[in-house]
Structures are given as structure tokens and as C-alpha cells.
Image (spheres, coloured by chain):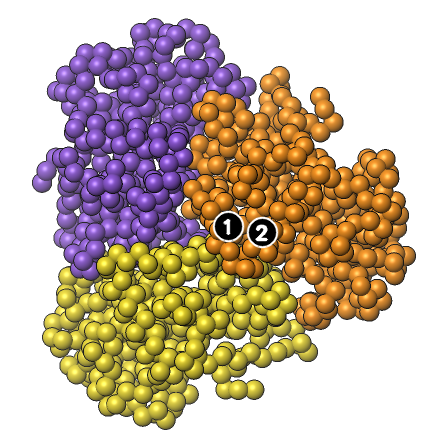
Chain colours: A orange, B yellow, C purple
Amino acid sequence: MSDDSLIIAGPSPHRHTYTPPKIAGRYEHKHIISVDQFAKEDLEILFDATKSIRKRIRQHDRGLTEICAGRVMASLFYESSTRTDMSFQAAMRRLGGDVIAASNGVRFSSVYKGEDLADTIRAAGCYADVVVLRHPQVGSSYEAAYYLDKLNQRIDNKTVIISGGDGVGEHPSQALLDLFTIIDRKGGLDHQSLTLVGDLKNGRTVHSLAKLVAFYRPKGTRLNFVAPTSLKMPENIIDMLRDLNIQIYETDTLDDVLGESDVLYWTRVQEERFTNREEYDAIKDHFVVVPETMEAAPKNMILMHPLPRKHEMGTQADHDILDADPRSIYFEQMENGMFVRMALLAKVLREAYV
Amino acid sequence: MSDDSLIIAGPSPHRHTYTPPKIAGRYEHKHIISVDQFAKEDLEILFDATKSIRKRIRQHDRGLTEICAGRVMASLFYESSTRTDMSFQAAMRRLGGDVIAASNGVRFSSVYKGEDLADTIRAAGCYADVVVLRHPQVGSSYEAAYYLDKLNQRIDNKTVIISGGDGVGEHPSQALLDLFTIIDRKGGLDHQSLTLVGDLKNGRTVHSLAKLVAFYRPKGTRLNFVAPTSLKMPENIIDMLRDLNIQIYETDTLDDVLGESDVLYWTRVQEERFTNREEYDAIKDHFVVVPETMEAAPKNMILMHPLPRKHEMGTQADHDILDADPRSIYFEQMENGMFVRMALLAKVLREAYV
Amino acid sequence: MSDDSLIIAGPSPHRHTYTPPKIAGRYEHKHIISVDQFAKEDLEILFDATKSIRKRIRQHDRGLTEICAGRVMASLFYESSTRTDMSFQAAMRRLGGDVIAASNGVRFSSVYKGEDLADTIRAAGCYADVVVLRHPQVGSSYEAAYYLDKLNQRIDNKTVIISGGDGVGEHPSQALLDLFTIIDRKGGLDHQSLTLVGDLKNGRTVHSLAKLVAFYRPKGTRLNFVAPTSLKMPENIIDMLRDLNIQIYETDTLDDVLGESDVLYWTRVQEERFTNREEYDAIKDHFVVVPETMEAAPKNMILMHPLPRKHEMGTQADHDILDADPRSIYFEQMENGMFVRMALLAKVLREAYV
């Protein structure tokens, strides 16, 4: 069993493992379910395609709609995620493709669990060329890929899955759009100081982003992890990052690193993650970015957030002030999400065309 | 602060106002959120486009699908409204455009209120060229327009919102399709006697329609308002109508005006609007249109209703008889809704093409 | 009143009946709501079109998208049915047509019942060229067809309905794809031994499939019905089949017929259908198909299932073994569903093109 493989949920003794395919320079007909599939070369290919697509969209280049014309994307969202869902749909449409989704949505039922997913993903695989799956269970995208492969063999299909997030597991397209935005704004990743703030223990976006940064093999790049003591970045990820020559600095105090940050990546700390309320009350004010935070921050720093945001950016009035700051680029980041997803869809469906 | 502006919900002291832009002969890139944006000239432009589109649809003119090809509409319905929703979607599709919507729908959460809307509308604005918003809160379409403008400045976009109704506030496309239907069937609006029946205090469709009638500046036109005493048309609207030379007659008895009505516009009186049940019981039978009502009505009168209908048109058996009456034009009115929405979408997205 | 007509729900004395039109060699502008509409000639026409479409899809023939270009399908699913819903949507898209559906779905409310359906179907009929309706009430598709006809007369439209299932009533497109799959795999229907297993009393798929088999007028074909004694195929269907020269064999024991079966069509027996639990416990193990069942089955038998499946195919581990058996063709059957629905949509919307 490879390090990247995962045991698929299933009744013993019928467990099986699944290892997502490495991109290795070729995207076509490959499932996209983990950042582990990407090496530096793959990221460069994808980001070049993203920039090209963004440029063509801004020029209203109608030729884009030739790329996925006649292809169908099934949107299978077992939990709501308006941004991810709408941006994948818009991405497919703008490539000329079509989108199908159950008119009443799909619901996750704990009763059928994996059994239902295995059959539903194969139904979607019969009708569509690509399935975007969002599911609350970790590993569901691996299971979906495993069963789609079986279907593809059976009915001579090449349907692929792109993960739109599986519980606290992975959300690869989010990490890809985050990394693209940083490189696009900073002109590269070498010698950057990236500060990731929030619940670094449970946050899949920060795990995936940190790994992608390392897979990009930058020179002299530093990752600052700012988290409450009980919600630190897991040791295995820290070790992996260090093995790949990323400098790491861990703290529970933003002030330690704010002044040197080129990128400030903010995420939420949820009260539910704490076992006692006093611990939460003691730290909560340190994990809110407000206009005063930006006053103390470098002039060329960029503030990112995966959205949606709640109290971790203060009140609506704070939002309005933060939104007006040119260093706040989370809406641009969100827009890049559509461009990165267009590049992904184009690559896996019709690589020769982009 | 202009008379047309609205205070956007938001935590004090960060309130702000928003005034929707006047159409003033030019629709392109303008939000459509209030009937106050329309002058007679604008209505004539829109209705001419509507007639042209209707004719082309009936001729199966495939050129229509060039108008919005490559453009994306996001459908954001925070409350269900099957007719409005499906007619906007069909309108966009028939113009060659694409539609995106969250696969599981969007839900209104009273916890996040405006905060969530401000960010969700900007997400939709990143991915789509036009957002159709239906929301249960009055003023939500103003707030959405305000935040979309901020996003557009930031990422150099021109996304517009079209309101699909905001609570008891406004529903401009409904009023536009109502007025179009009257003018189309009657050949004009001069010297017409229009009778509006139902809850005229809380009914947004009757408020908006009455205002649009006045903005059209017809000659010798009369508005009859038939409502229970406690649910009369608000004084400020009455005053505004009189200022614009519309003749007004108010009554609680349909018989006073049925015989002279050229148009009978029927809406529902809801029991929940009454503080005591006796008051409701005393009037309820007077606010149901039944086959006998039509027997007493003029031969060339038209009966309109915004739909859906419930007990205000009696039983299913009554419906069947009313539906068979050639004077009942509410299905034609509903069909016109798609044509008017096609004209609106074409105008705001690609004015030169229609 | 014809044998095929149905009394439409509605308040007495305003009941009315509706008889679905026979296909009789011509599909265009005909509602598809019952297998009773189909004679052998009609099935042959449809299956030829299905094969042609399947071939063109596999050749990536882009000309297919000309067939329904500019046409709109409304998806009205009052209960969830992910497979039927997504396959109709994919079918319409792959023919170049567009799909609309309420963004938040539609819900069945027992309060408004038929009244709401009558108006909602007419709304959909105003905006779309074809409405796919799934509804929990028996007869709802007849009612929808009745009211659509009234609308069509009124606004000079030709909108048709295709039933996606009405409660325990009918599900014609499922029966059509089942029969297509059998004939396609077996090269015909003559001299085949078809074994239908499960709740044959309440199962609409088995009723409809059995009827279609008979309408196809095969020679020497045998239907074996395997059901618990209390859930046998209704007498009126048995009589009808015998009148059409189908050989019938009824049993509660699969072993009686497994060895001679060319087709094994499996469906679920639900515990809720039994009045006492002991009766259910006594039979339940006989109505589960497991790997051992397949070991005892003929080598050229095919195993079919309408999906979704639950315990009637054992555990997830059993599923995996059954899925790997080349005789299990339920995924191919599911894929054929899209092709048959493409043929249906093409036929009713633009018969000259397919």
C-alpha cells in the first residue's frame, strides 16, 4: 500500500485501497482527488493554462466554448457549498459544456453511507463525462474514484471525478486556486513568507495549501503557522514540509510574524473544536482579523481567505473596511477559482485543446 | 438621500444608502431592482423588444440564441418561487445563455442575514454576468446591488442583478409583465378602467403595477382599488398616483366597479393579515372570484392574476370554469413573463442586439 | 370511458377522464405517460432510434446536438429520483437542448395536491417544450397531460409531458429501457424465459415491463413470476398477459425457475408491505440475490435490476462480487436509460430528425 493510498470504507473483509494517479505531465482522463497527485511540473502546466483561459475570458473569446462542447458535467453535492458548486458550474458552462444535477439535490444519508455513494457515482458516471463530488465523509472521493474505474472498465467509458471537498479530508481545487493566486500576485513563490492563521489542526484548506507549496519546491520560502496551542498543524505535515526544505515557524501569536508576512492566509477557529469554553474565550480575540490588523501589516502583503467568512473577520462594518483595502484579495482569489477550475476541466476532458 | 434610495441593513454606524439607477433610455449594465427606475420611454423600449422577441420565438428564429451566447446567469433563490425562477431560466436559455444555481439550492438563514447575502452575491458576481435574486427580506436587492457595484469596481466586472422579488418589497419584473399584458391586450392604456382587488396594503404586485401605470403617463385612466377597509392601498401611493393625474376610486365592494372594468386584476387576501377572525370571516366571501363574478363582468374585460392562486379563485371546479373563459388571460400573462424577462436580460446584457 | 383512461383527481362533480393517445407510428407532440400507448411497431421504431443514437454518441457525433437545439425541457421532480432525473437531463443536453428546474426544487404538498399540480404544470408548459414529471401520486401524469392539453389549446403551444414515474402507478421510460436492454442483449424476445422477482403486487416496474413484453407480441416467450404469496402479480395483469399468449408461471421459490432463466429481473421486497413481521422474516432470505445465486444460474443468463438497490443484493461485499460478474448488466441497463430517453425526447420533440 502506497503512502498516498487510502483504505476505502466498506464492510470487512471486503476492504480495498485506492491510490490516486500521479499527474506526471498528463491530465487527460485522470481523477483529481488529492494534492498528492501534483508535482511542480504539473502545477506549472495547470497555472499556464489558467492564465491563458483567464486572458481569453477577458477578451470574450468565444472559441473557449469549443473546448468542452458536447461534454456533460454532473454536479453531486451531498452538502451545500455555494461557491465551489457555482464556480465549477460556471467553469463548465464557459467551456461550452453542459451541467446536470438532481433537481431536488442529493442528500447524504448516514444509513446507506458508502453503499449509496458507490452506486450513485456510477449512475452519474453513466450519464456524464466528469463528476464533481462534494461529500461530508473523508475518503469519499477515493471511494468514488475506485468505483468509477470499475464502471469505466465495464461500459468502456472514461468518466473522471473531480473532488469538490470530502469532509475534513481534502479539497484539492481550493488549494490549487490558493497557490495560483499567490504565485500570480507575487510573481513566484521563492523567498516568500506565507503566514497561515486559524485552526491548523482540522483545516483541510491549510493542510492542502501547505503541501502544495512544498510540492512546488520553492527556494527560501517560509511557512509561518499561527494557531491556538491545541489546534496546531499536525506533526506529520510539519515533518513532510521540513523534508522538502520549507522553513517552518510555529506560534500562537500573529504579532510574531505579521511584520514579515508577504501573504496572510486567514481561516476560522471554531468554538466547537475546544473542549472547554475558557480556553476558547482566552484565545478567540487573537484569531479575528480587523482593520487594525491591516494597519500593522506590510504595505505589499496580501490578505487571503477561502470564504465564506463569519466572525473571524469581525463585524459587517469591519468587512466593509477590510474589503476596501487593496491588499484584501479574497474576491480576486474567489474569481481565480473559476479560472483554475476551467483549466482543470479542460485538462481532464480535452487536454489537447488547452 | 434621494426619495428612491433605501437604507441598506447593516450594523450602525456603518449604514449606507443605495439609489437604483434610472434607466433613462439605456439598459445595458444596469441593475433592475425597482419600478422607480422606469419612465414611459423606458417602458416603450422594453415592450417593443418584448414584442419583437415573442414574434421571433414563435417563428423559431434561432438567431435569438446569439444574443446571450457565452453569458452566464446565476439563479439565487433564497425562497421558492417556481414560476419566476423557471421563467427567468427559460428566458436566459432561449437567448442562448447559460444558467448556474447551487445544486442543493440556497437557504436564507436569519443568523447571518445581510452578511451572508453580501458575500454570496459577490461570489455569484465573480462567476456570472447577471444574478437573479429572490430573497425574503425587503431591501435585499438594494443591498445586493450595492455590494455587486463594489465587487465590479474591484475586479473590473460589469455583473448586474435583476430582482426576482424581495419579501413584501418589490418584484419589478412581475409589474413589467403585468403592464405589458394589459397594453398588449388593450392596445394601449389611455381611458382604461383598471380594477385591482385584494390585499392592497401588503401586496407588492399591486403597489408596483399601480406605480408603473402612473409612470406610463396614460390619459383618462382610472384605477379602482377594491380592498377590505383594513387592507387599503397605502396613502403615500394614492397621493403619488393622484399627483401623476391618475383617477382613483377606492371601495370595499367589487360590485361598485365591476361593470365598468376593462381589466380585473385579482390577488389574494390572506387570513393571517387580520387581527381578529370575525373581521376576516365577514369579508372573505367578497374576495373570491367565481364563475358568477364573470357572468356579471363586461364582455371585453380581461381577468388577470399573478399566480399561484388558491382559494381566492374558489375550488378546482371553479378554476376549470374560469380557465375556460376567454376573458381569463392569466396563463397568457404568465407566458408573457418569459418574453418580458427575455427582453430584460437581453437589454441589460447586450443592448445593441435587441 | 376507455380501458386506458383514468379518472383525474378533482372535487366532485367536476371529475374528468383522460385517455393517453396511442403512439400508432407517430410520436411527435404526444405525451408519454403509459406503456398502454405502445404497440410492437412503436417499440421497434423507438428501439431503432435508440440504437442509432447510442452509436452516434459513441462516435462523438456532434450532429446529435442539432436535434433539440433551441428546445427547453422542464424538470419537475416532486420526489427525488437521482437516476431518472439525471438521465433525462443528460439526454436532453446531449441532444443540444436546454434544461430548466426550480433552483430549490419543487415539493409535494398534500394541502394543495392536484390543484397545485394543475397550475404548476401549466407554468412549466408556458416556458418549456417538454416537461418531465415525477410525482408521488398515482394518476398525476394523466392529470398533468389533461391540463397541458388545455393550456396548449389556449396559447397555441405543443408542450408535451413525459412521465418520470407517478407513485406506484407507472414509470414508462423505465419499462422501455428494460425491454430495450433485454432485446438488445438477447437479440430478440422470442422463446426467452424471463424471471421477475420481488414484490410483484406493488412494483410498478415489473407491471409495466410485463405489459410491454406482451405488447411486443413475442413467440414462445415465458414470464416466471417469483413473489411471496401475499405479494403476487395482480390477477388482471396475469389475465391480460395470458390473453396475449404469454406463458405464465407463478411461484414463491426462485429455484423452481432459476435454471431455465434467460433473464433474471430482480426487485426489492419491502418489510413495510407485510402486516406481520413473522411473515416477512420467513421469506426475506429468499428474496436476496447473492453470489451463490449466480453460481446456480445459467451461464448466459443476464441479471437486471432497476436500481437503486439495498439489502436485496446483500452486503456491499456481495455487491462488489455481483458487479464483477459479466452476467450482471444493471449498469449497462442504467446507461441504456439515457439512450432510450434521448430517443423519446427526440421523437416527441422533432420526429423528423431521428
Picture quadrant where residue B262 is located = bottom left
Q: Residue furthest left?
A: C1
Residue denoted by label 2: A53
Name the residue located 45 percent from the left edge and 41 percent from the top edge.
A71
Q: Name the one closer to the observer, B274 or C299.
A: C299
Picture quadrant where residue B121 is located = bottom right
| Left or right of residue C208: residue B149 | right
Picture quadrant where residue C266 is located = top left
Q: Chain of mark 1?
A: A
Tell me the crowding category of disc 2: few under 14, some 14 to 19, or many 20 or more residues within 10 angstroms, Cα based: many
Q: Residue A214 in the image: x percent, y percent?
A: 79, 41
Q: Is residue A210 above or below residue A160?
A: below
- Determine contact: label 1, label 2, CB under 8 Å: yes
Q: Quadrant of the N terminus of chain A?
A: top right
Q: Quadrant of the C terminus of chain A?
A: top right
Residue denoted by label 1: A64
Give residue B286's mark.
Answer: none
Q: Chain of mark 2?
A: A
| Element under disc 1 | helix
Q: Residue C157 in the image: x percent, y percent?
A: 21, 55
